[in-house]
Amino acid sequence: MRYRIPLDGNPTMDLELRKKYIGAFRDACYMSDTTPSTFNCLYKTWEKACEDAAKIGEVSGNAPYAQGYECQPVGNGDYTLQIGSDPANKLFVTFEPAPRQTPLVEVDGVLVEVSGPYRDLPEPPTVGPGHKFNNCFSGVFAADGTPLYQHKYILQVNRKAHGGQIHSDLAGFKWPCDVYNANCEKVPAECEEPLVLYEQEIDPPPFDPGQFAEVNHVVPMKDQRSCDWGTNSNKNAAVISNQLNRYLSNTNPPVEEVKRVNAAKSYAP
């Protein structure tokens, strides 16, 4: 359940207006995984919902709302906020079930499905939002007849395709990070994803602990509201370093990441 504020205009269809709301209200706003998909801003607390509701007029480009009024409870979980000198001029902040955010990612103004390099692998028996790659069996068995966890199967496929090495599916990807200089001071830097990654149980040391291979959800398991979002479909998988995985964890996937995994050659089972 979340508190929904009533947006001015039609941000579901108006991309520029949608950008304004996202720019102002950030992660509270998203397109829903419903038919049809709609754009709304939903909040965990009524206080934050009311704070942002007072800004809707200004953010949308319409006349700013009158300020200085406080939300009043209706009695059923909803709230009202007066937005003009006339007490009848008010909006409703409604307490209602929050739909899942669409797993489609906006790329150049178009919502696209993530379909990464493991798209041609057989899907595991259980696929769903919020499922981990290392909790589910892949449906494939190892040479000794034991069932393979999904992440182990994906790493095995990657290693086989690269002559015994694991390669990052985002090699060369750059992101802001912190490093320690010669004086042991933390300073901002730019990290770059390496090509070759390692499995602790298989590859002999030494290697950088930040280069452990992990299977990343391109659309993260959890959205910015900590709700289940990305699934464990093989299409949503990318092998990357644990250092990059930490950076991307539970954030909206960067457009560069989506473009690269969708354009990548698919691995053979």
Image (cartoon, helix red, strand yellow):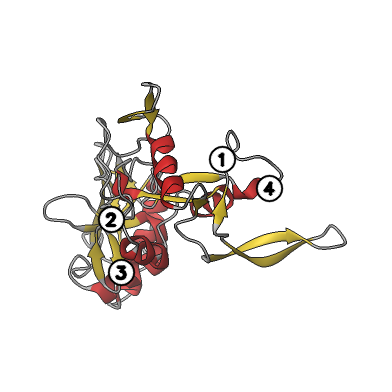
Nearest to N terminus: mark 4 or mark 1? 1
Camera-nearest residue between 268 and 170: 268
Disc 4 secondary structure class: loop
Q: Which residue is mark 2?
A: 115
Camera-nearest residue between 219 and 7: 219
Nearest to N terminus: mark 3 or mark 2? 3
Residue 193 versus residue 246 in the image, above or below: below
Nearest to N terminus: mark 3 or mark 1? 3
How far apart marks 4 and 1 lie (CA) works out to: 10 Å
Residue 199 is marked as 1
Q: Which residue is mark 3?
A: 107
Q: Nearer the viewer, mark 3 or mark 2?
A: 2
Q: Which residue is mark 4?
A: 207
Q: Considering the image in quadrants, where does the N terminus appear?
A: top left
Nearest to N terminus: mark 1 or mark 2? 2
Does residue 67 show up? no
Question: Mark 2 is on which residue type?
Answer: Ser
Nearest to N terminus: mark 2 or mark 4? 2
Does residue 176 show up? yes
Q: 10 Å neighbourhood of mark 4: few (<14), some, or many (≥20)?
A: few
Residue 167 image offset from top left, x and y in percent:
49, 54
Q: 10 Å neighbourhood of mark 1: few (<14), some, or many (≥20)?
A: some
Q: Please, which residue is most extreme toward the right here?
A: 183
Q: Please, which residue is most extreme toward the top here?
A: 145
